[in-house]
Image (spheres, rainbow, N blue to C red):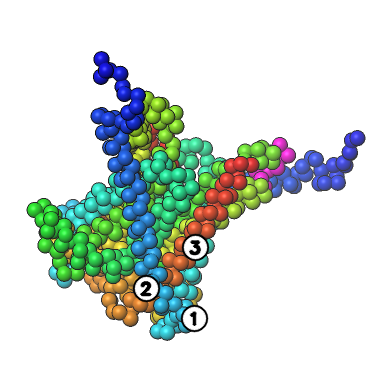
Amino acid sequence: MSVTVSPAAHGGARVSPLRKRADQFGDRAMLGICLLAALIAGAAIFLVGYQIVDGARPAIAKFGFAFVYETTWQPNFGEFGAGVLLFGTAVTSAFALLLGGPIAIAIGLFLTLLAPKSVGAVIGPLVELLAAIPSVILGFWGLVVLAPFVQEHVEPFLHDNFGFIPIFGEPQTTGLSVFTASLILTIMVVPIIASISRDLFQSVPRDLQDGAAALGATRWEVVRGIVLPTTSSGVIAACILGLGRALGEAIAVSQVVGAGSEISSNLFDTGSTLAAQIALQFPGALTEMHKAALFYCGVILLVIGLIANFLAGWIGRRFSYSGAVNW
Amino acid sequence: MSDLIPDPTAPLTPSGNLRRRQIVSRITEGGATAAAVIALAALVVVLWTVIARGAPAISFDFLFKGYPQGVGPMLLGTIAISIYATLIAMPIGVLVALYISEYSGAKGARTLKLILDLLNGLPSIILGLFAFIFIVAAQEKQTAFAGAVALAIIELPLIARGSQEVLQLVPKHLREASDALGVARWRAVLTVVLPTAIGGIVTSTVLAVARAAGETAPLILTTSNFDPKSFSVNPFEALPNVPTWIYKVSEEGSDAGYAEAWGMALVLVFIILVTSLGARALLARSKRKLSSS
């Protein structure tokens, strides 16, 4: 049985010229709007970079590159150098990565290889929830709860038992220290690295792992011999991304780092970081040079952050086992 | 001779090297489990503190009245700023995602994804500095709009990447069927592709909003000098908001202020965790549905 529908009944099998024109226009408009949005996104990054450098221009003109390693920071005298801040940034982020990286990778391994599927399905998202806690609340918790605890228990313990290592020096009175800031940063980087490494470990071919196990490898030997080597570049990229996060965290660090102004080998002393200094001082900055110096800190932060991002992307692509990095 | 024939009655326990390897394996397994426990413990301790210390502060007055009885203006302001940021970021983000999935070739897609990753990697304090010099310094006054622009830049890459992943899951045969019926590309995008992916796009947006709602660094530079008594949603003045208030209180260090800050922290954490957990579950569901069809 054949049904004949007259073309006119539903607008015509042949497209009317008007409709064709409308479609041509619609296609172009759609492409145009989407392209515009893409250009805006691209322009945003350049605009941000340009504006930050622009804001820093007076400081760049006055202090030049010496700003990066000079250690005086005296707003009242108009003398600025970011050496102390750069040091604090390096120490806190390195510490957070050294402590958080292994924990996060271990969590990734636990979720993919050890935990039963149902347990992993609960714990995985919970670990990621850690990243959803706003930094100001984590910092507030660090200030009110963690800092006193660290000052009363952790710092004396480390000082008494490992005091021969200079980084575990005399504890201060408040618990606000580079050490506490590093712990807070650790909490922040763990979920990032853990969720990326979990995805990486899941991408390791099952055959390889089963093959190793069939040859008598223990679980740890499978991890060391198969899982980690095939994903190492991705894991390193994940760590660099975590590092980028730690470098740029301003709020939580500024709440617990104690706003120190000197370089100290003692982790239990106060300190400051590039990002934290901006958060602490920018709202109260009176002179233009002070603001410009803080913008200069922003420039340094931006450069380090961009390098970290490019490096992570490059390592991830260049050395990845099977393009396994997806973030 | 008897040494070479194993005693058949001996229990089957490994010895020597194998035993050592198994112990090493056990220890590392224990370490991995311990790491997961540590992370969960951190989450539980933080959340527990927020709940235990914040709950006593919560009351009707606290949520809905102006300062000093309550923190209603801050809550309203945070909601308003988040909405403004999303109004800026969502259209751009979704269009970027459409461009990546429908129009750009592989090369363009790679470039755009790189740009989005770089945007995503920008420290939020940098965006605060940007909004300050670009808008606040130019207008010579703090505005919620400036804060919203900074938050929009935080949301943009999240929305774009999330939407693009969902759009990529829209089955090819839907697009091919539209082509076969002679439907113009833009009509297919608007009436077939977008409606199929809309659930995932909305949940990605909600996730981005949850992330941006707690951001503090951009707001302390753009909308921190406000009147905590005024219920306002005017984007062209500094609006009260929760994150900067918690930050201010934590800097001042008074007990009454702390109680208030814990209360606000509880409200903020509650909203953020509930929305992000819900959105995650929905997103996983809509992705599953798309990839199975």
Residue at the (35%, 53%) spot, across then down: B37
Residue at the spot of label 2: B53
**How far apart in space, not on screen, are marks 3 and 1 (Cα)?**
20 Å
Where is residue A267 shown, x and y percent of the image? 17, 58
**Nearer the N terminus, badge 3 or badge 1?**
1
- In the rendered image, residues at marks 3 and 1 fall on the same chain: yes
Q: Position of residue A5 (x, y in %)?
A: 87, 41
* C-alpha gap between disc 2 and disc 1: 17 Å
Q: Is residue B12 visible?
A: yes
Quadrant of the rendered image containing residue A282: bottom left
Q: Amino acid at mark 2?
A: Arg
Which percent across, then down, holds residue A72? 13, 62
Q: Which residue in the protein does label 3 denote?
A: B274
| Tag 1 residue | B60
Q: Which residues fall within the magenta stretch?
A: B179-189
Mark 2 or 1 closer to N-term?
A: 2
